[in-house]
Amino acid sequence: MNQRPPSVESATAPRSRFAGCGLLVPGLLWTTLFCLLPMVVVLAVSFATRGTYGGVLWEFSLDNYRDLLHPLYGRIFGQSLLLAGMTTGLCLAMGFPLAYYIARMPPRRQALWLIFIMIPFWTNFLVRTYAWIFILRTEGLLNTVLIQLHLISTPLDLLYSNEAVLVGLVYGYLPFMVLPLYAAIERVDPALIEAAWDLYADRWSLFHRVLVPLTKPGIIAGCVLVFIPSLGSFLTPDLLGGARSMMVGNLIQHEYLVARDWPLGSALSLVLMLMVMGSLLWYLKAQEPPAGERGGQ
Amino acid sequence: MRGPGIWLRGISGFGLAFLYLPIVVLVVFSFNASRLSAVWQEFSWHWYGVLWHDEALLAATANSLWVAALSTGLVVLLGLPAAMGLERLRGRGRRSLETIFLLPLVLPEVMMGVALLLFFVMIRWPLSLATVVIGHAAFNLPVIIVMVRARLQKLDPRLEEAARDLGASAWQTFHRVTWPLVRPAVLGAALLAFTISLDDFIVTFFVAGPGSTTLPLRVYSMIKSGLSPEINALSSVLVLSSMGLVGLSLLFQRR
């Protein structure tokens, strides 16, 4: 593009610039109408009042945000943050060795293992969650096997607990952790690892003095990619947690579809969005120094 | 160079088993004759037969396929020009438009669902299969834009310029030069959008009206209303079909 003679530039540039704008119009209209505008509606409704029979009364109030301070909501937000944080930690603990193992394989086998990591990720999320119900419920596979092996006499209560939700979340989002970690570890010069070994580093110092500093952007990317969907998850706590372990997503759904308190539901979803955007901004900031655009996901 | 130690192999093996055992178990037990689904009785195709005669399920599948096809068509028509337009922009405008287009990728799905629900209620648009199509097209648009742009960025801009210099109109340039070059990426992206649409539960859950049950909604209500080995059979079919679709998508992108 840069080597073109100036005369040609002036002949085509203005035309293609306008053409570019025209091309953007339909997509931009669509996104504005069905993404931006709905968000503006949510924002507006979050400052409105609930009607007697559900619905929205357009009377300005801050009550919905004041209601959020209620300890019950605080507990659910806290529980969501805790579960999302633990999911992220467990995914990192399991994903890092896995990604390291894959990155140190011969290239052909790397590709195969990466496809293996991807396949569950592309499997229907409902199906993957159902698999855990099938395994964990009272008459489920795990209890059946344990009873047949005479390890337990009465079935354990495994499903509908925070632990079940945690397992489901880790299961659902582990691939999100492994892929960026793999990309980061794969770029580390093997000579550096060799050097660490030669200098009598043990495994732990190799990990936290060599690998962690070199793969930090990948670690942060993986953590954010796991944390964000875990925090906003609805299906996993709904199916594996039941009433005992609600997360913000379930609370929002409850306010909208069951309690029909749309203003409160809107305030809740905006707070969730702010939390997500916050972690995203932190991620973008952490990614900045090593330069270069890291577009999309 | 040292080979991987036992602990590394151990954790990696455990990770892979953790990812696959649940799926394998589901598929194995879909061939179980017993109604008490976690106790193995004998091999049978019975539950696949039940699946095939489940009218509600077949109707939901048809709905899902329609929604996926229509929303994918829509996002390709909107996304391809948008991706090309973004590539032609420079500077600040490009960055801010990128942010707007990519927003649905980072929004929590629940947020997207309630926002659309609220919006449709406010403008008094009755919830139906059409609102589901719109919802899916809203979250799939960035998928197409990201994937097509990745391809466009690799193209040599001189090809289009040469065509224009030789007197081709904008449409001719697109039709004869750009389109053949981006077609594999568009097909791959479209297949991916189709798969995501087929699998979507949350947005659909909020914006589907009565009578517009899609396959995931049906699966959800089956799970909620008590388990039956039929769900295992259905799951196996879904696992196999999404693997097939993703395989195809990878194949297209590689070319």
Image (spheres, rainbow, N blue to C red):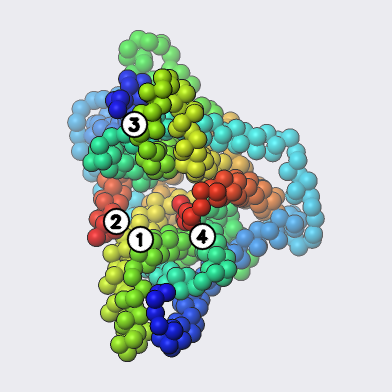
Query: Which quarter of the rendered picture does the N terminus of chain A lie within?
Result: bottom left
With A40 as the anchor, is A232 left or right in this view? Answer: left
Q: Quadrant of residue A45?
A: bottom right
Amino acid type, residue under disc 2 in the picture: Ser
Q: Whole-Å distance between the Cαs marked 3 and 2?
A: 27 Å
With B17 as the anchor, is B127 left or right in this view? Answer: right
Q: CB of mark 1 within 8 Å of CB of mark 2?
A: yes
Q: Chain of mark 4?
A: B
Amino acid type, residue under disc 3 in the picture: Tyr
Amino acid type, residue under disc 1 in the picture: Ala
Amino acid type, residue under disc 4 in the picture: Leu
Q: Whole-Å distance between the Cαs marked 4 and 2?
A: 21 Å
In the picture of the structure, the residue carrying the numbered disc 2 is: B249
Q: Whole-Å distance between the Cαs marked 3 and 4?
A: 33 Å
Binning the other alpha carbons within 10 Å of mark 3 as few (below 14), some (14 to 19) or many (20 upward) gives many
In the picture of the structure, the residue carrying the numbered disc 1 is: B189
Expressed as whole percent of the image width and height from the top left, the position of residue A131 reads 37, 34
Q: CB of mark 3 within 8 Å of CB of mark 4?
A: no
